[in-house]
Amino acid sequence: MSDLVARRQLNRGYNDGFARAVEIVATPVVFGVLGSLVDRWLGTRPLFTIGLAVFAVVGIFAKLWLGYDRQMRDHESGAIWSRRRVASIATGVPASALDAVVPVAPTAPSPDAAIPPILSSPTPSSPTPRSSAPPAEASPPEEGNAA
């Protein structure tokens, strides 16, 4: 069943893309032909042809831009990062009121937190990490006690 849904979404994407491609190409051509007819009728050769073709290109660009923006708003409305805004719209409570919870201040790290404990200098309250005395040397075994 989910395979069928995925195929429908894929085919719908192909159909939308093909429709947009035809619209991008055909609309300026149709407006250019209409501009050419108006130019012949009024005797102003390239004025309306170029003007209406440019008008069509700008109009198609604006239509695609606004349509994409609307689709993205619809797509993102269910996303996790926009749930606060959706809750605000559903309840009628302003979004700023939903953030009125008193934030907990983070605790400040100690000054020695960034320094590894081995390299930090010992404080009077903490034990010394290592002894500063040189290690004791082992004495050689006595020869008289050999068995």
Image (spheres, helix red, strand yellow):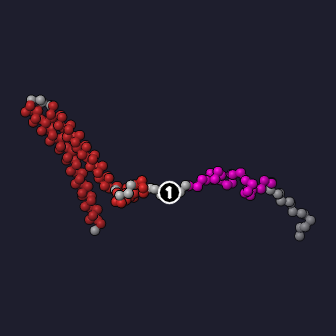
Q: Quadrant of the C terminus?
A: bottom right
Q: Position of residue 110 (x, y in %)?
A: 63, 53
For the residue marked with disc 1, what is the amino acid? Val
Tag count = 1
Residue 2, can we see it?
Answer: yes
The outermost residue toward the right is 144
Q: Residue at x 32, y 56 (%)?
A: 75
Q: Quadrant of residue 76?
A: bottom left
Q: Secondary structure at mark 1?
A: loop
Q: Which residue range is magenta in the image?
A: 106-133
Q: Quadrant of the N terminus?
A: bottom left
Q: Residue at x 12, y 38 (%)?
A: 34
Nearer-the-camera pick, 18 or 31: 31
Q: Residue at x 51, y 56 (%)?
A: 103
Q: Position of residue 85 (x, y in %)?
A: 37, 55
Q: Is residue 2 left or right of residue 94?
A: left
Q: Position of residue 73 (x, y in %)?
A: 32, 53
Q: Residue at x 19, y 40 (%)?
A: 56
Q: Position of residue 60 (x, y in %)?
A: 22, 43
Nearer-the-camera pick, 68 or 119: 68
